[in-house]
C-alpha cells in the first residue's frame, strides 16, 4: 500500500525534477523543453520520486548500468556527460545493497576505472562487447542507460546535432529490446533525445524540437532514438538526471550518503578532463559539461545535495 506524501515532501521531489531540468542553470529554452518532456511523461507526478521508489526495491538485485558516448571525430575518448552520473547512481544503489555492474565503451574503460578510484567506488566495470553482453543478458534484474546513444528509425546512431556515429560507441539497442520483452526493469536517462529510452516519446521530442526530425547523414531517420525503456528521465544534462535520482533516494531513505556531493562533482570533472573526456557541446577537454561551466554544474549538485540531506554542502 502506498502512503500519500505530505505536500512538503511532494514539493521537494518536484523541486528535484526542476533542478535537473536546469532551472536557473541553463538557457530558458532548454529548461522549458526538459520540463515539457517531464510533464508529458510524468503526467503531473515527480519522475525522480516515481523512479527512485522503484530503484529502492532492487535490494540484492543485479543492476547493469550502461554509459559512454564515443564519436571518433568529436569524442575519441568519450564525453564527460554520462560516466560521472553513472558512478554517482551506481554508488547510491550499492549503498542500498543492490549489486550494480557498470558497462562502458572500451575507449572509456580506463578512464571510468580511474574516476571510480578517485570516487572511492569499488564497483565492477566492464567494456561493452556485444558477445560478452549477449552471454550475460540473463543476469540483470534491472538495466539503466545513462547518456547512451540509441538507434534512430533507420537503425543508426547520431550526435545531438545530426552527425552519424561511424565507429566509436557500439549499439546495444537490441539488448534493451530483449530486456523490455522479458519484463526486465529498464530505465533511460538522457537529454537531447538521441539516447536510449526516448522511443515512446519521439513524437513529443519532434514537436518540441523540430530540428530533431532530420539529420546530416541522409539516412532519413532523424536523430531521436526509437529504443524504448519502461521509465525515461529527461534532464538538461544526463549526469544531473542521475544525480537527481541519487538525491531522491537519499531523501526517501533519510540517508545523506546516497547523495552526490558538490566537491565530488568538482573533482571528477577535473579528472575527466585530464583523462581526455570532453564537454560534449564544446567538444574539447575542460572544466565544464554540455556547454555549461563547471561551477554551474557544481552548484546544481549542491542544490540537490542540500535538498536531499537538509544540510549545507
Image (cartoon, rainbow, N blue to C red):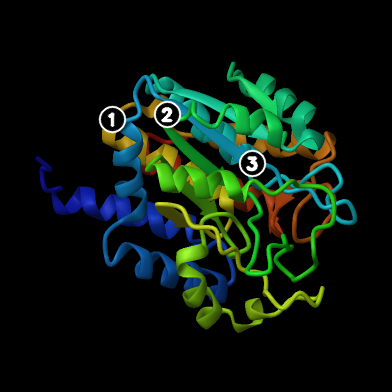
**Residue at label 2?**
258
- Circle number at residue 295: none
Sequence-wise first label, 3 or 2:
3
Q: Do the CB atoms of the residues marked 1 and 2 lie less than 8 Å apart?
A: yes
Q: Do the CB atoms of the residues marked 1 and 3 lie less than 8 Å apart?
A: no
**Residue at label 3?**
67
In the figure, is residue 220 to the left or right of 174?
A: right
**Residue at label 1?**
253
Q: Which of labels 3 and 2 is toward the front?
A: 3
Marks 3/2: CA distance? 20 Å
Dot 1 surroundings within 10 Å: few (below 14), some, or many (20 or more)?
some
Residue 254 can be seen, yes or no: yes
Q: Nearer the viewer, residue 33 or 286?
A: 33
SS at mark 2? helix
Q: Which of labels 1 and 3 is toward the front?
A: 3
- Residue 95 position by quadrant: top left
In the figure, is residue 269 to the left or right of 139?
A: right
Q: Is residue 301 above or below residue 136?
A: below
Sequence-wise first label, 1 or 3:
3
* Residue 228 % position (x, y): 49, 57
Marks 1/2: CA distance? 9 Å
Amino acid at each position: 500500500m502506498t502512503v500519500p506524501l505530505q505536500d512538503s515532501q511532494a514539493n521537494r521531489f518536484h523541486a528535484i525534477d526542476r533542478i535537473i531540468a536546469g532551472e536557473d542553470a541553463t538557457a530558458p529554452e532548454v529548461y522549458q523543453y526538459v520540463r515539457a518532456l517531464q510533464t508529458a511523461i510524468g503526467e503531473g507526478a515527480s519522475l525522480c520520486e516515481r523512479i527512485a521508489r522503484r530503484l529502492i526495491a532492487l535490494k540484492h538485485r543485479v543492476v547493469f548500468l550502461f554509459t559512454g558516448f564515443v564519436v571518433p571525430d568529436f569524442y575519441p575518448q568519450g564525453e564527460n556527460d554520462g560516466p560521472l552520473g553513472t558512478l554517482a547512481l551506481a554508488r547510491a544503489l550499492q549503498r542500498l545493497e543492490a549489486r550494480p555492474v557498470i558497462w562502458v565503451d572500451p575507449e572509456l574503460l580506463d578512464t571510468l576505472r580511474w574516476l571510480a578510484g578517485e570516487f572511492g567506488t569499488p564497483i565492477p566495470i566492464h567494456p561493452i562487447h556485444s558477445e560478452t553482453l549477449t552471454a550475460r543478458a540473463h543476469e540483470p534484474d534491472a538495466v539503466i542507460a545513462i547518456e547512451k546513444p540509441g538507434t534512430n528509425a533507420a537503425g543508426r546512431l547520431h550526435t545531438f546535432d545530426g552527425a552519424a556515429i561511424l565507429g566509436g560507441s557500439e549499439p546495444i539497442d537490441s539488448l534493451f529490446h530483449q530486456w523490455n520483452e522479458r519484463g526486465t526493469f529498464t530505465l533511460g536517462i538522457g537529454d537531447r533525445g538521441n539516447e536510449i529510452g526516448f522511443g515512446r516519446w519521439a513524437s513529443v521530442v519532434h514537436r518540441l524540437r523540430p530540428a530533431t526530425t532530420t539529420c546530416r547523414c541522409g539516412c532519413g531517420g532523424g536523430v531521436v532514438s526509437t529504443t524504448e525503456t519502461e521509465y525515461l528521465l529527461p534532464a538538461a544534462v544526463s549526469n544531473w538526471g542521475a544525480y537527481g535520482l541519487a538525491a531522491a533516494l537519499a531523501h526517501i531513505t533519510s540517508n545523506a550518503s546516497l547523495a552526490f556531493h558538490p566537491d565530488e562533482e568538482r573533482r571528477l570533472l577535473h579528472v575527466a578532463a585530464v583523462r581526455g573526456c570532453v564537454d560534449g557541446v564544446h567538444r574539447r577537454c575542460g572544466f565544464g559539461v554540455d556547454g555549461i561551466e563547471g561551477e554551474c554544474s557544481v552548484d546544481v549538485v549542491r542544490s540537490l545535495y542540500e535538498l536531499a540531506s537538509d544540510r549545507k554542502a
